[in-house]
Image (cartoon, helix red, strand yellow):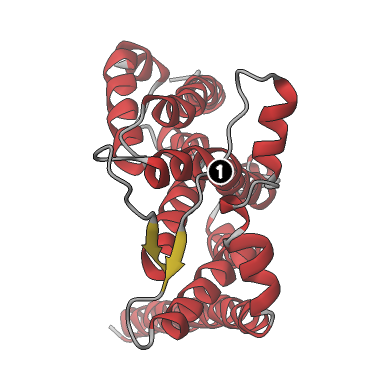
Amino acid sequence: MEKAKEETKEQEMSFLDHLEELRWHIIRSLGSVIFFAIIVFVFKEFVFDNIIFAPRRDDFITYRFMCLLSEFTCFKPPEFNIIPRDFGEKFFTHLKISFWLGIIISFPYIFYEIWKFIKPGLYKNEQKAATGMVFICSSLFLTGVGFGYFIISPFAIKFLAGYTLSSEEVINSSSLASYVSYLTMFTIPAGIVFELPVVVYFLSRIGILTPAFMRTYRRHAIVVILIFAAIITPPEVITQILIGIPVIILYEISIFVSARTQKKYFSDN
């Protein structure tokens, strides 16, 4: 009885120790987000002039690149005004931008903290197999965010800001909060979607997902991907294709990842 009580006490202490460790990982991650958010908040003019408002200017890198390709692919953003509609809109939008950019910049460190918490619970061979996971996840997320910012945003701005209802002159304008919300919607979800191969790896590792299942339901997955692309992008075919094609490619890569994982961990079963 005494031995059982001691074992129970050790398990409870171990559980509490894990909770304490998790708490510090969360605190350090939040500290990183707050640190970079403060930096973004302080350098507001640089952030808004060179990052937030850059896709609405003619000299944005995407417009210049498309015009260098050919006259057929060349396009420019329409002129439109950004007007704060509410009394505190500029301030609260500034806070929102600082928070989201703080998360984006901190993502590699946040995932590093997550990995430090998960890693001790893995076997040595699993730790070895997952070498470089922080780099891979961070690279995929930042690539997705960059894709949303440099590819999706310019086409979406061109379509949404240039959309007309009649032949009568209508002044194009947008509230600051609306513009920032759309820009956020075009970037952060793309970063999350680009994590698909990593998600497939872990699901395949625990046996939930198989390459045969992914191949069987490939057509269904493509339909779901196109629907998802239609949800997170404006109702414009080119933009939907731009987000749909990379995700379909990621799906095919994920099938390869699942097949490699199954071969490595389940080939003997």
Q: In the depicted view, which residue is nearer to us: 12 or 238?
A: 238
Q: In the image, what residue type sits under mark 1?
A: Gly
Image x and y of residue 168, in percent: 27, 43
Residue furthest to the right: 68
Image x and y of residue 192, in percent: 46, 48
Image x and y of residue 127, in percent: 64, 48
267 versus 137 height, above or below: above
262 versus 9 height, above or below: above
Q: In the depicted view, which residue is nearer to us: 64 or 42?
A: 64
Q: In the depicted view, which residue is nearer to us: 31 or 81?
A: 81
83 versus 10 height, above or below: above
Residue 15 visible somewhere in the drawing: yes
Residue at 34% in and 20% down: 222
- How many numbered circles does the render carry? 1
Disc 1: which residue: 144
Label 1 crowding class (10 Å Cα cut-off): few <14, some 14-19, many 20+?
many
Instruction: From the viewer's perspective, tell me whether residue 240 is left or right of residue 30.
Output: left
Instruction: From the viewer's perspective, tell me whether residue 134 is left or right of residue 29.
Output: right
Residue at 64% in and 78% down: 44
Q: Quadrant of residue 65?
A: top right
Q: In the depicted view, which residue is nearer to us: 195 or 179?
A: 179
Residue 18 visible somewhere in the drawing: no
Residue at 57% in and 25% down: 264
Residue furthest to the front: 168
* Quadrant in the picture for the N terminus: bottom left
Q: Secondary structure at mark 1?
A: helix
Q: Quadrant of residue 206?
A: top left
* Quadrant in the picture for the C terminus: top left
Residue at 51% in and 68% down: 100
